[in-house]
Structure formats: structure tokens, C-alpha cells
Amino acid sequence: MARIGMDPKSWVENLFDTFDFIDSSSQEIIAGIGRVNSGEFVFYAHNLKFEQGFISSRGASEILRVMELAQTKKIPIIALMASPGVSVKEGIKSGHEYTKVIAKNIELSGYIPQIALIIGTTMGAPAYSATLMDFVIMNKARSTLMVTGPGVIEKVIGQKTNMKDLGGAEIHAKKTGISDRVETNIGEQINSAKKLLEYLPSWNEGKIAVTKSIAPKSDIQLPTSPRQAYNMFYFINGLVDGDTFLEIKPEFARSVITGFARIEGRTIGVVANQSTHLAGALDYESARKAARFIRLLDSFNIPLLNLIDVPGFMPGEDQEHHGLLRYGAQMCQSMQTTTARWSVVVRRCYGAAAFLMMQTKAQGGDYVMALKDSSIAIMGYAGAKTMLYENDGVDRSQEYFQQYEDPRIAKELGVVDEVIEASAVRAKIVELFDKSLTKKYGLKNVSKKQISLP
């Protein structure tokens, strides 16, 4: 791919296989219909060459017209964004018109996919519009996203900062979690959007194409000791088709992995505990991250697969003060999907977080598997031993496993549906795919679920 500059036409030319521009009454917006891999999408791009990218009321009306076209045609919207905000020169009229764009973002959430590519600096109302979309993809070279710029901040509150520290790609990847992917440059950013579109339907009742099945990258690798950190990607790479795993928010709240993949060519959403960070515990950020991703899966009828290795919720004053209860509750709520949800207990499964992740039949879940050497209990041996055993220095961990943690106990109680070998999980999921085709309780009777929630 050739080097891409800040000309919006070059962004469009690199994004789509073919495209047609729509006649526009506004020079600040370039819009049209594009096609990638036989899929059709509506797009609009900010034109930095006109009024430095500021959006007038006419430009906002043009964006709204494009969004309404996507709504009518039931196809995704891709916004290529680089705007410092609404027109100051025009005054309140531009802000008033842009509120209609914001309202439309919210209306379309969970109905058709909305993808924001933050090509350059984006501030004010356009920044809010981007944040309300289903996916935000940034590039390290030029992307910044913020309410207002460093100059205004210094004048108003006397704080000195710069564009990257205020709202750069790294900030939104690691701290705020607003960015779903950060790529090196605009070209890779565009390729990332193309790949993402392969996992999504054109609208919330549309079908996702089934692709050719590809063998997993490797066999599933499990740790030899339950005490050592386990990189869940070893399990994911042994389960899903080839290189199909596309991680969402990879640098944010890293104790949970979220992403899309294919198994036997069929799209699935994965939520997995990652014990290489915070020992895999759910903290307030990872609960928030998982909840939003699960809402997205439910909105677009994509099955959910939970891969579990969780010691519980992360304790501490900081966690409680940042709303662990609230975000944990949001994750509980998001788990009540109308699409299929399956769970695999890979290793540890303890505490309230365990039941949240397992999604048993009692919670409306579809199927829970547990690997034969996994552990399922209210708490691990280290926490339970002082409550259950005399402090005589004897290691009773094996006794505790047999009495409390053995997954066969959970199977007898109906908490787990099957105790399974790791090598058999992929085939079982393929079987579950075939059984879940009618899980949706009549699409016309299911209300649309919005993704753009806190």
C-alpha cells in the first residue's frame, strides 16, 4: 500500500475495493457507498482542506443524510474522521445541527455497525460522535481524540499539556479504553477496519458469511502447574481457525481478553481471563470492557464463548471506589444474551466471578464445559484452608480438590454440563453451533439492544 497522506480521497481509495461518491452540497464532507469483499458500506470523510475540517450546519446535515442512507439500506457506516469540531464562525447553528448526528449515532447503535477511523485530530462534537460508535480505530502517527485542545485547557484551568498526552492513541488504548485498535499508520488502520468488517453482519438481523475452515495454529497447550501464570492465548490459538483471532482493546484492562474469531469458518466472540495480568482477576476496568463487548455480540447475533481462568474479583479500596460493584453488575446484565453463550472452565473458577463467567443453565446459559484438571469452588485452597482445616502445617490441597474443587462435583450438581478433554473442545463447539441456530427467540420479537452505554 502506498503512503497515505491527509487527502480524504486517498483514504477512501485505500479502504474500498470499489466506491461511488454521493453528490454533496457540502465541501467539508466527502461521502459515498463503497464495497469490500462483496459487502456494501456507506462512508463519509472529513475534508481538512476546507475550513480546516470544521463542520458547519450544512456539513452536519450531510453526515446525517449519509447515516440515514445507511439506515435505509441496512449497511454499516464507516466514518473517516479528522475534524477540530463544529464551526465557531457559524455559531450555535452548527452545534444545533450536529446534535442530530449524535442522536442518530445512538439510534443506530446495535442496529447497523458503526466504525470510526480517527485519521487525524478529532475534537468536540465529532469526538463524541466517534465515541458513540461501535468501534474506534486509531493510528499512532496522527490520531488524537478529545473534548477540547491543550490551548483552551491552559487558558481555562492553567494546565499545560499536549495533544498526545491529552488524547493520543496510546492514552485511549491503555487508559480510557475508547480505542478498540491502534495501528502504526493510516494504511494499517484502514486494513484493520477491513478485517473487522469480515466478522460483522451488515445489520443486526443480517447473516455473517461462513468461510473456509482452517486448522488451529497449534495444539492446545496447558500449564503443568496450577500455580503458574497461564497465557490464555495458548488455549485460543489451539482452538480457533488459523490466524482468525482479532483482539479488541488489546492494551486496555488486560486481565480480560476480548475478540472475534472463527471456528470451522463461523464467527464467534471470545471473552477470556488472562492470568498473566492481575492473575486473571476481574477488576472494574476489565468488567466494563467485557460488558460492552458482550452487548455488541448480542446486538449482532454473534455467539459468546467464555474461557475461564479466574481467581475472583480484584479486591481493594481502589477497586471499590472506582465502581467495581457497578461494572461487575453491568457485566452480569450484559451476559443475559439472546444469542448462544457457551463456557469452558480452562483452569481456575472461583468466587462470584466464577458464576458470572460460567453462565450456567440457571442463568440462561447454553452449555458449560470444564477441563478434567480444572478447579471449581467458592474459593481456592489458599483462602479456604484456615476455615476448613487445623493449622498443623499439613498440605491438604489434594484433599480439598477432591472434596470441593473437582469439576465432577459441579457436573453432579448440574452446574457443569460436561467434563471434557482440551482436545475435544473445538469439536464440541462445532456441535453446539449446529444446535444453536434457533436460539434467537424470533428475531422480530427481540428488541434492539444498544451498545453505546457507559
Image (cartoon, helix red, strand yellow):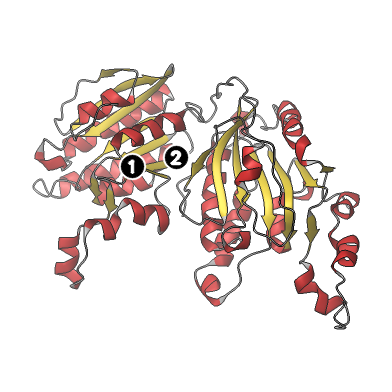
| Crowding near the residue tagged with mark 1, few <14, some 14–19, many ≥20 C-alpha atoms within 10 Å | few
Q: Secondary structure at mark 2?
A: loop
User: For residue 389, which quarter of the picture?
Assistant: bottom right
Q: x and y percent of residue 226 in the render?
A: 74, 59
Q: Is residue 276 above or below residue 433?
A: below
Query: Tag on residue 313?
Result: none
Q: What residue did someone put label 2 on?
A: 109
Residue on which disc 1 sits = 184
Whether residue 52 is visible, yes or no, is yes
User: Residue at the location (43% across, 19% down)?
Assistant: 37
Left or right: residue 206 compared with residue 50:
right
Upstream in sequence: badge 1 or badge 2: 2
Q: Quadrant of residue 25?
A: top left
For residue 211, side relative to residue 345 (left or right): left
For the point 46% across and 52% down, the residue is: 251
Question: As shown in the figure, which amino acid type bears the numbered disc 2?
Answer: Ser
How far from the left and from the top, in percent, is residue 325?
58, 66
Depicted 298 relative to depicted 131: above or below: above
Instruction: Give the number of callouts.
Output: 2
Contact between marks 1 and 2 (CB within 8 A): the answer is no
